[in-house]
Amino acid sequence: MIRFYGGKVLTMQGGCELRSAEVWTDADKIAFVGEPDAQQLENTAFEREIDLHGDVLMPGFKNAHTHSPMTFLRSYADDMPLQDWLTKQIFPMEAKLTSERIYHLTKLAVLEYLTSGCTAAFDMYFMRDGFVQACEEMGFRSVMCGAVMGAQESARELEEDFEKYNGKSPLISFMLGFHAEYTCSKELLTAIGGLAKKYGAPVAMHSSETRREVDECIARHGMTPTQLFDSLGIYDHGGAAFHCVHLTDDDMQILKKRNVSAVHCPASNLKLASGIAPIVQMQQAGIDLALGTDGPASNNALDMFREMYLMTVLQKSVNADASACSPQSVLTAATVGGARAMGLADCDVIAPGKQADLIVLDMDKPNMQPVNNIVSNIVYSADKTNVRLTMCAGRVLYERGEFAFADKEEIYANANRIINEMKTE
Amino acid sequence: MIRFYGGKVLTMQGGCELRSAEVWTDADKIAFVGEPDAQQLENTAFEREIDLHGDVLMPGFKNAHTHSPMTFLRSYADDMPLQDWLTKQIFPMEAKLTSERIYHLTKLAVLEYLTSGCTAAFDMYFMRDGFVQACEEMGFRSVMCGAVMGAQESARELEEDFEKYNGKSPLISFMLGFHAEYTCSKELLTAIGGLAKKYGAPVAMHSSETRREVDECIARHGMTPTQLFDSLGIYDHGGAAFHCVHLTDDDMQILKKRNVSAVHCPASNLKLASGIAPIVQMQQAGIDLALGTDGPASNNALDMFREMYLMTVLQKSVNADASACSPQSVLTAATVGGARAMGLADCDVIAPGKQADLIVLDMDKPNMQPVNNIVSNIVYSADKTNVRLTMCAGRVLYERGEFAFADKEEIYANANRIINEMKTE
């Protein structure tokens, strides 16, 4: 067992509950949250006791939309519109990827997740064996999301991946998913609706990221992407829609009714000039929200603090209302909301029996002082320098700037070697 | 002399020039930039030699608009509109400040500046002796900006401060300035125009932060704030206008013609729902731009990386153009542009004879890998974890998380004591 004591616990149970309590973890689970009596302490053997010194322990952030292996494209093709960026830079480089390259590039992303207090990622990419190997070796939790596109046949590949990767490892799961409406035939989308029904499973996809995507979908199908997916049964068992920048009122009603989480990626949406998602309206409609970085090629950091800050201040700005989008709602999206979107019911809050996916935030930094309001401090002022410790499934993977199970220099060297090889191939 | 070697130097001379070079500092100045020969090395006695290990040395960021002592109000009154925030929370608490309190609260801000790679602040506040003492003790450079308001008599206070604080210390200077149009009588503004003429000096002020401010100024004076200030000679010798969110084309022509820097504070403008400044249009008009955090009560961090990221991605979003506001232009505003706005002609670039106000950015972190483009990495991906070292006037004040000349625990304790006292007074 590992004992955390001497700090505060933001359990995220029933909102932003903040308690003075100890947290004990046993193997991959949280074993105890509370004030132990002398007897309990005496009877328990701890492999490690960590004095929080007033720091805050809370659930790890869930990065609910990313493309981890795209680290190789960081700062490679900035300042371009989405379509040019995809077709002229991203797709040609991606064609050069191999599973081995994805293995190394994923490791670089996981390092950055850990520095950002992120304990799980909802990853949409391809050549998954390299990705799975990297996450397992590093002890990092991931939910992979199907990313099929094209013709109806792709549905078989999606089903095979769904069968292959679920249950493979306690750290890895797989959710039905596809790239986006504009890259899938209607036959494929119909077949995916069939898979949702067959498995009673949620489905995830890019949706309504750009105005053009929505307009073209309406021209093609007479419906918005949300309406189209709903009409095909894709949302019958819930799911997650990445971006949701351009939604109609009817779209929002569908997401709410079908228990589909909207995954907000504010940094990417700004940088690619896609727009600002209607978060306040989605909150009013009661839609479950989650937060993601999108891939490092379009962000370019993998930094949940940046996303949290943007989520709230952009809503204040576009709604001309400084009270819009409370820090409590942001912290909920970044933790509990992400876990819900990713199907990680055991990774959402700090409570006995839950997975020990947690972080310690360092209050002993100038940006967290004075302590007027810890939740506001985290959302409005915190950054990666405040991540003291990141634990996934009960293992401390990152602590005070050091990675416990990863050789960062080797990972950087491999990433640089790979991008240089790809540039000249 | 201190020798930095083994890294890259982003001199910021003539744009974002990146060189492989050594940088030597002697007392408060940069003594040498280049590749020394064996003879030079042999003949030079270094008090310290710092191996950059491939890291990037560059000019420190200039925080060109802030209210440093407002650290005590961090997370104290978030999520409120500007007018309520000022009148119901900020002003009543500020009435309880003393010079001794300002001394302690400033120290907390300076700690955070150092963690953010910031080597100088353009500070607008009051009770200046406490502020000056804190900056001098900590070795931190500041330009104070006049903040007078009210009736014509205040001009005398402004002139006294101008005479009193300039030349007092190599680290401290004072620029003529006033709070804003809406807090100053026309007689006071006229008198300030007279001081600008008398001293041949630039003048700084909040300007055009909110729509309401501009509309009310037009109703009162038949002119925008920019037009009004120009008509009174306030801009005759240049200056700095903080915020510049709501400008007309004519305002921009005036700023350009009068060599007035526009100081952009994107985080504060978003959080207080003031709007998004027309940076692209200002760039097209050839206006000098600088970047600031505004005070910690309205941001809530003092983080130049956050401001840099916001500066570019917000322009991409509002202009629906992913190529808008290049990272080069952002880095220029955060360094050279800030120095220009603050009258710190010797603190702008890395070159012999300039002040040794510099930082080292740690590339040995996952968010800076791979190294496709260092300028893009800094603007789009870097954060406070990348600040390896901050040097002001030739002294290393912060290095690898440690403060060389400050007791952070004592500073935190004082800040918490003061805010708790003020809450109950």
Image (cartoon, coloured by chain):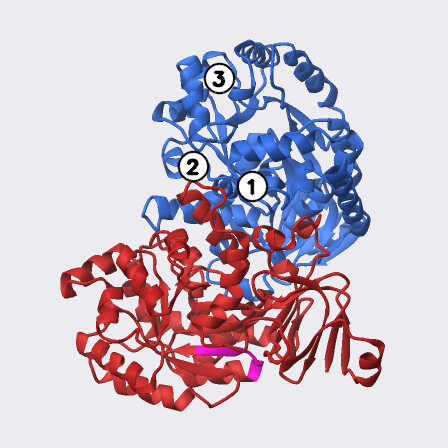
Chain colours: A red, B blue
Q: Is A70 on the left or on the right of A219, as rendered?
A: right
Q: Which residue is mark 3?
A: B229
Which amino acid, by three-letter code, is at mark 2?
Ala
Q: Which residue is mark 1?
A: B335
Q: Residues within 10 Å of mark 2 (few under 14, many from 20)?
A: many
Secondary structure at numbered mark 2: loop
Give the residues drawn in magenta, as a range: A137-143
Secondary structure at numbered mark 1: helix
Q: Residue at x 40, y 54 (%)?
A: A284
Q: The C terminus of chain B appears in which quarter of the rendering?
A: top right
Please tell me whether residue A142 belongs to the stretch shown in magenta: yes
Which amino acid, by three-letter code, is at mark 3?
Phe
Which tag is nearer the camera, tag 1 or tag 2?
2
Asked whether the residues under marks 1 and 3 belong to the same chain, the reply is yes
- What is the chain identity of the residue bearing mark 3? B
Out of B264 and B237, give the one closest to the viewer.
B264
- Residue A353: percent from the left, percent from the top? 61, 81
Q: Residues within 10 Å of mark 3 (few under 14, many from 20)?
A: many
Please tell me whether residue A235 belongs to the stretch shown in magenta: no
Which tag is nearer the camera, tag 1 or tag 3?
3
- Is residue B13 visible to us here? no
Q: Residues within 10 Å of mark 1 (few under 14, many from 20)?
A: many
- Residue B67: percent from the left, percent from the top? 63, 35
Q: Is A275 on the left or on the right of A214, as rendered?
A: right
Q: Which residue is mark 2?
A: B277
Out of A204 and A405, give the one closest to the viewer.
A204
